[in-house]
């Protein structure tokens, strides 16, 4: 008799243990509001009580009663299935919690250096260059560059030829002044502005990737319940941690007291003083020195304190949009998306999948205002993603969403801060007011930029009134006002 009771109790004990573990995991996740935790707890208790009653033996039923045996067997199977589901759920929640911690606490950047030779040269590997000369720019990223040169020295002894800038370094290779150059791969797209055939006429014989921590942000002076996030959008291969130009630059001002969000976009070609040099160049070039350099550049230019940054890889935006079931975006005119074979998007609201959203965010040739309109579309796409992800219904799909975001996203916002915001939103399901603004400027082709001082490039000269007005808009959001 005791054996039978213990066998029955084994299923109930297993179910109870897995229920408790699941509850602990969900609590540790930190995303689920208290009222939902209470509901989950009551459901788990009800299931345990239900199975306890189901598996109770009938005193007056003969042990040969087939119905009683069948009921008992079904009860054990159901209890076992519930236990298995709770184990699976616990593992999924644990994995999600780990992914969130890694994503929101992983302040790292990846910098890739290459030894580059002319494509028609005979050099196949680094050792073939032993005794030759390597072109470098010594005054940029000196610490990392010296480390890389030491790694190179382990495989080949090269004499260094120094140049004033990367443009001169590339020219030295093309003119056969040196047999190879050391290239920070983040600068490759910048060199393409000087020589569109550079990548086609050269090849890489050695590559090394450095992973380093991003410096933490200083303590913000923004009032309680308010914070500013700088969003840097890159459009490059690799992870969002890859050091690259910042092609999308957006200041997101958030006031959780008034539920106002202001998105302020800055043109990628805005001619501003770079924080690392004090010299003016395109804002997009600030990203070549790391995301913290862009953050500091924007802080200095806009007279604000940025609490957090987030870097998004627009090349993998499709995965995120598809994971959340698509987004609803309004197009203010008929437009043909070149990236999708000239696909027509008519004026009005559209439900977009990942490919369409990415093409819409990239399109500029179909608009008279070009990059100005593209920036507006990028704001609309990001706004639609944020709105969709605020929906409580996505909580059941959060693991898939985290997998999709993966290498597409990196931030220095602490995981606890994100969980606090998400939990509050799930608890209140508050309606947010979104506003979007754009810093205006005048396009100009000229020389004099810090990175490529002798090359004529396109820059956007800031409109002082626009800069002043947008500074005021940000202050209004931070001071609990709603901008007109």
Image (cartoon, rainbow, N blue to C red):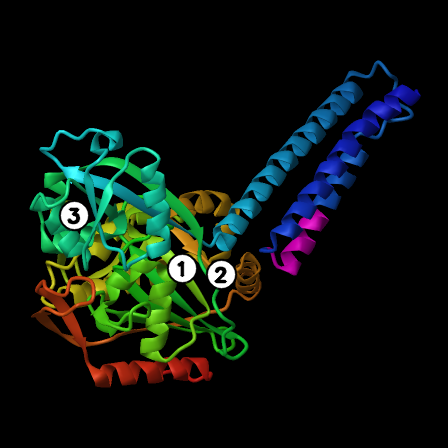
* Closer to the camera in the image, 73 or 196: 196
Q: CA distance from mark 3 to mark 2?
A: 33 Å
Number of marks present in the image shown: 3
Residue 421 percent across, percent down from the top left:
53, 64
Write down the residue under mark 3.
339
* The N terminus: image quadrant: top right
Q: Is residue 60 visible?
A: yes
Q: Earlier in the sequence, mark 3 or mark 1?
A: 1
Query: Where does residue 262 sit, x and y in percent of width and height?
Result: 37, 73
Q: Nearer the viewer, residue 36 or 149?
A: 149
Label 1 and label 2: CA atoms lie apart by 8 Å
Question: Element under label 3?
Answer: helix
Range of the magenta residues? Answer: 32-43
Identify the residue position indicated by label 2 in the image: 413
Marks 3 & 1, CB-CB < 8 Å contact: no
Q: Residue at x 28, y 48 (%)?
A: 315
In this rendering, position of residue 164 left or right of residue 290: left
Mark 3 or 2, nearer chain start: 3
Q: Which residue is mark 1?
A: 310
Residue 37: in magenta span: yes
Please report contact status of discs 1 and 2: CB closer than 8 Å, yes or no: yes
Q: Main secondary structure of the magenta part?
A: helix
């Amino acid at each position: 008799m005791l054996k039978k009771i213990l066998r029955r109790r084994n299923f109930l004990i297993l179910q109870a243990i897995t229920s408790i573990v699941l509850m602990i995991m969900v609590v540790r996740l930190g995303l689920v509001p208290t009222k939902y935790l209470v509901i989950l707890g009551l459901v788990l208790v009800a299931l345990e009580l239900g199975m306890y009653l189901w598996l109770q033996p009938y005193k007056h039923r003969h042990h040969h009663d087939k119905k009683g045996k069948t009921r008992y067997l079904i009860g054990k199977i159901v209890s076992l299935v519930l236990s298995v589901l709770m184990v699976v759920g616990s593992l999924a929640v644990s994995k999600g919690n780990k992914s969130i911690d890694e994503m929101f606490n992983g302040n790292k950047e990846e910098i890739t250096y290459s030894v580059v030779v002319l494509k028609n040269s005979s050099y196949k590997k680094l050792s073939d260059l032993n005794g030759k000369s390597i072109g470098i720019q010594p005054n940029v990223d000196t610490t990392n560059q010296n480390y890389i040169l030491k790694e190179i020295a382990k495989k080949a002894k090269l004499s260094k030829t120094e140049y004033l800038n990367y443009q001169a370094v590339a020219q030295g290779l093309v003119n056969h002044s040196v047999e190879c150059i050391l290239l920070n791969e983040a600068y490759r797209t910048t060199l393409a502005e000087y020589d569109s055939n550079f990548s086609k006429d050269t090849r890489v014989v050695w590559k090394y990737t450095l992973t380093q921590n991003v410096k933490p942000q200083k303590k913000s002076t923004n009032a309680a319940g308010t914070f500013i996030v700088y969003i840097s959008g890159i459009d490059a291969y690799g992870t969002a941690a890859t050091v690259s130009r910042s092609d999308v630059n957006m200041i997101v001002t958030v006031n959780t007291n008034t539920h106002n969000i202001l998105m302020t976009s800055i043109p990628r070609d805005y001619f501003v003083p770079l924080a690392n040099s004090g010299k003016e160049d395109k804002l997009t070039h600030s990203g070549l020195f790391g995301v913290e350099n862009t953050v500091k550049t924007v802080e200095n230019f806009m007279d604000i304190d940025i609490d957090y940054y987030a870097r998004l890889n627009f090349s993998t935006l499709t995965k995120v949009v598809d994971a959340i079931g698509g987004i609803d975006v309004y197009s203010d005119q008929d437009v043909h998306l070149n990236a999708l074979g000239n696909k027509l998007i008519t004026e009005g609201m559209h439900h977009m999948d990942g490919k369409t959203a990415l093409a819409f965010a990239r399109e500029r040739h179909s608009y008279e205002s070009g990059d100005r309109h593209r920036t507006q579309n990028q704001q609309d796409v990001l706004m639609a993603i944020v709105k969709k992800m605020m929906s409580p219904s996505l909580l059941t799909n959060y693991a898939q969403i985290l997998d999709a975001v993966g290498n597409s996203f990196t931030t220095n916002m602490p995981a606890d801060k994100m969980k606090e915001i998400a939990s509050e939103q799930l608890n209140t399901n508050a309606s947010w007011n979104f506003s979007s603004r754009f810093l205006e400027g005048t396009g100009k082709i000229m020389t004099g930029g810090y990175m490529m001082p002798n090359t004529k490039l396109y820059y956007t000269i800031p409109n002082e009134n626009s800069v002043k007005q947008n500074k005021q808009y940000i202050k209004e959001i931070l001071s609990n006002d709603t901008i007109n």
